Image: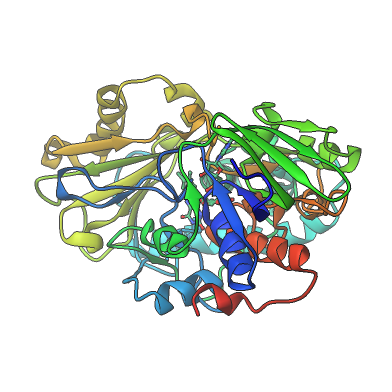
C-alpha cells in the first residue's frame, strides 16, 4: 500500500461519505473511500429479490422544496412518486381511520380527531419552548394534552398519536426522546419515494470514486498533519480523514481513535442514541383496504404496536402495505422470525378487515438493530441533550479529522438530506473554502 498517495481518506460509503468524497475529488483532491460492507449506500439500501423493488432503509425525501437530495435525484433522472405521509401527518392526505373498536371512522369523526391533534400541536410548541433541560417528549406532550381540559378518551387518543409520532419519527418511546427531539419535524413541500429504489442515489454519487468495499476500519490515528486509518486490508494515510460511520458504531468502540476523541465530542456522542426502528413490508394477492387512501390507521390500545399501514401500491401496482415496528415494538420483535412478525401484523389487519385479508405473498422484515455497521436505524436525542449536540460532533479535530453523517447535522438529522449536507460541510472544511452543493450532481 502506498500510504502517501491520498489527500483524504473517507470512512463509510453512505450518502455522507460519498457526498464528501465526490466534492473533494471534484476539487482535485485524491480521495479513497473505505467501506466495511460489500456495497455502497449504507442505510440507503434497496432489496431487488423476486423482481421486486423494496427500500429496506430510507424511503422518503421528507419535503422536496429546497432539498439537495431532491435536486440530486432530479439531476440524475431518478423517478420519484409523490407520497406525503412520511412525517406521521394526521391529515393533509386521505387516511382511513379506524376507531379503538376497529370500526371505520366517518370523515367527520376523523376530521374532529385531526383537529384535536392540531390544537394540541399549537400548545405543544409553547410547552416545548418552555421545557426544562431534562424533560422528555412524553413530559411535554402530557402537559400540552392536559392543558386542553378534555375528557379521558379524547385526551387518550391524542396522547397516543403523539407517542406514536415519537416512535415512528425517531424509533423511540416518547419518554426516551428529548423534549426538543422533534423540533426539526417540519416538511417543506411534498414528500416523494423512489419506485426504482433509493439506492440509485448513492450508486450515482459513487460513480468515478475509488471505493474500497469490504474494508472495515478499526483504528484512526491522527497527528498534527496526517491521519492513518487501519483496516483489515492494511493502512491508509492521508492529510485528512472524514469519518461518517453511524454514532452506534462510534459508541460501540468498533473504531479506536488514537488519541481518543476530544471531550466535547465524547460528550455530544453520549447525548445521542441509535434507535430501534424496523420496516415490515407485506405484499398481497389483492387489495382489501380502501381505495384512494395513503394510509390506514388504527386508534386505541389495540394499535399499541401496529397502528399505521402505508399503501405502497403506487410504487409498482402490486397491493403492498408498509408498517413499522418502532421503539418498544422494535425491541420486542428483535429475534422474531418473519412469519411471527407477519402473523402479529395480520392479526391486527384482520381485526379491521376480517377474512378479506388474504395471506401475503411476500413479507420483508428489516433488522437494522442487529446490523453491525449501523446498530440501529438513525440517532435520536436523549433527554438532557440539546439540538447543538449534533453540530458539536462535527467540530474539526486537530485540523485533520472530521466526523460527518446524519447524526452530525442539526437542522434535519436522521435523514438522507442530513447525511448529504454533513458530507458537504466536511468537504468544505477539508478544503478550507465554500463549494456549491450542486457540484455533487454537476
Ligand atoms: C429503516 C430506515 C428508514 C429510514 N427512513 C428514512 C426516510 O424515509 N427518509 C430519510 O431521509 N432518511 C431515512 N432513514 C435515515 C437515512 O437512511 C440515514 O439518515 C442516512 O442514510 C445516513 O447516511 P450516513 O451516510 O450518515 O450513514 P450510513 O448510510 O450508515 O453510512 C455509513 C457507512 O459507514 C460504514 N461503516 C460502518 N462502520 C464502518 C467501519 N468500521 N469501517 C468502514 N465502514 C464502516 C457503513 O457500512 C455505512 O455504509 C431511514 C433509515 C432506516 C434504517
Name which residue lies at 56% across and 50% down.
33
Choose between 16 and 355: the one closer to the eye.
16
Q: Judge whether residue 150 can be spotted in this image.
A: no
- State the image coordinates of residue 359 (x, y, percent, origin top left): 13, 34
Residue 92 figure quarter: bottom left
Quick check: 83 above or below 75? Answer: above
Of all residues shown, which one is farthest toward the left? 285
Quick check: 180 above or below 334? Answer: below
Choose between 230 and 109: the one closer to the eye.
230
Relative side of 196 to 226, left or right: left
Quick check: 276 above or below 79? Answer: above
Of all residues shown, which one is farthest toward the front? 2
Choose between 333 and 244: the one closer to the eye.
244
- State the image coordinates of residue 259 (x, y, percent, origin top left): 85, 33
Relative side of 88 to 204, left or right: right
Indicate the quadrant containing the N terminus: top left, top right, bottom left or bottom right: top right
- State the image coordinates of residue 302 (x, y, percent, origin top left): 40, 33
- State the image coordinates of residue 269 (x, y, percent, origin top left): 77, 39
Amino acid at each position: 500500500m502506498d500510504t502517501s498517495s491520498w489527500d483524504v481518506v473517507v470512512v463509510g460509503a453512505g450518502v455522507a461519505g460519498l457526498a464528501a468524497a465526490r466534492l473533494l475529488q471534484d476539487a482535485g483532491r485524491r480521495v479513497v473511500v473505505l467501506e466495511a460492507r460489500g456495497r455502497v449506500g449504507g442505510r440507503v439500501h434497496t432489496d431487488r429479490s423476486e423482481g421486486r423493488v423494496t427500500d429496506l432503509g430510507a424511503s422518503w425525501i421528507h419535503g422536496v422544496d429546497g432539498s439537495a437530495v431532491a435536486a440530486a435525484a432530479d439531476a440524475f433522472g431518478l423517478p420519484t412518486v409523490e407520497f406525503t405521509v412520511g412525517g406521521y401527518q394526521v391529515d393533509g392526505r386521505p387516511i382511513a381511520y379506524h376507531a379503538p373498536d376497529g370500526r371505520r371512522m366517518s370523515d367527520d369523526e376523523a376530521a374532529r380527531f385531526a383537529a384535536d391533534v392540531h390544537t394540541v400541536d399549537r400548545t405543544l410548541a409553547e410547552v416545548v419552548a418552555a421545557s426544562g433541560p431534562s424533560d422528555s417528549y412524553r413530559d411535554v406532550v402530557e402537559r400540552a394534552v392536559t392543558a386542553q381540559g378534555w375528557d379521558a378518551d379524547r385526551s387518550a387518543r391524542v396522547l397516543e398519536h403523539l407517542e406514536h409520532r415519537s416512535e415512528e419519527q425517531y424509533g423511540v418511546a416518547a419518554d426516551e426522546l428529548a423534549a426538543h427531539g422533534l423540533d426539526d419535524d417540519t416538511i417543506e413541500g411534498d414528500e416523494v419515494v423512489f419506485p426504482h429504489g433509493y439506492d440509485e442515489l448513492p450508486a450515482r454519487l459513487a460513480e468515478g470514486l475509488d471505493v474500497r468495499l469490504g474494508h472495515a476500519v478499526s483504528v484512526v490515528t491522527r497527528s498534527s498533519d496526517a491521519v492513518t486509518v487501519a483496516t483489515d486490508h492494511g493502512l491508509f494515510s492521508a492529510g485528512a480523514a472524514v469519518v461518517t460511520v453511524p454514532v452506534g458504531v462510534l459508541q460501540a468502540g468498533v473504531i479506536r481513535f488514537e488519541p481518543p476523541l476530544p471531550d466535547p465530542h465524547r460528550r455530544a456522542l453520549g447525548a445521542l442514541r441509535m434507535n430501534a426502528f424496523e420496516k415490515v413490508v407485506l405484499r398481497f394477492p389483492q387489495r382489501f383496504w380502501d381505495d384512494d387512501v395513503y394510509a390506514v390507521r388504527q386508534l386505541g390500545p389495540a394499535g399499541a404496536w401496529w397502528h399505521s399501514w402505508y399503501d405502497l401500491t403506487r410504487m409498482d401496482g402490486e397491493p403492498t402495505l408498509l408498517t413499522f415496528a418502532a421503539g418498544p415494538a422494535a425491541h420486542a420483535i428483535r429475534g422474531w422470525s418473519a412469519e411471527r412478525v407477519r402473523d402479529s401484523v395480520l392479526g391486527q389487519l384482520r381485526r379491521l378487515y376480517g377474512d378479506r385479508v388474504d395471506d401475503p405473498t411476500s413479507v420483508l422484515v428489516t433488522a437494522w438493530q442487529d446490523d453491525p455497521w449501523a446498530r440501529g436505524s438513525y440517532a435520536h436525542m436523549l433527554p438532557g441533550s440539546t439540538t447543538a449536540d449534533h453540530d458539536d460532533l462535527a467540530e474539526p479535530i486537530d485540523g485533520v479529522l472530521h466526523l460527518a453523517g446524519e447524526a452530525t447535522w442539526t437542522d434535519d438529522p436522521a435523514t438522507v438530506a442530513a447525511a448529504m449536507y454533513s458530507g458537504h460541510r466536511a468537504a468544505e472544511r477539508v478544503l478550507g473554502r465554500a463549494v456549491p452543493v450542486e457540484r455533487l450532481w454537476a
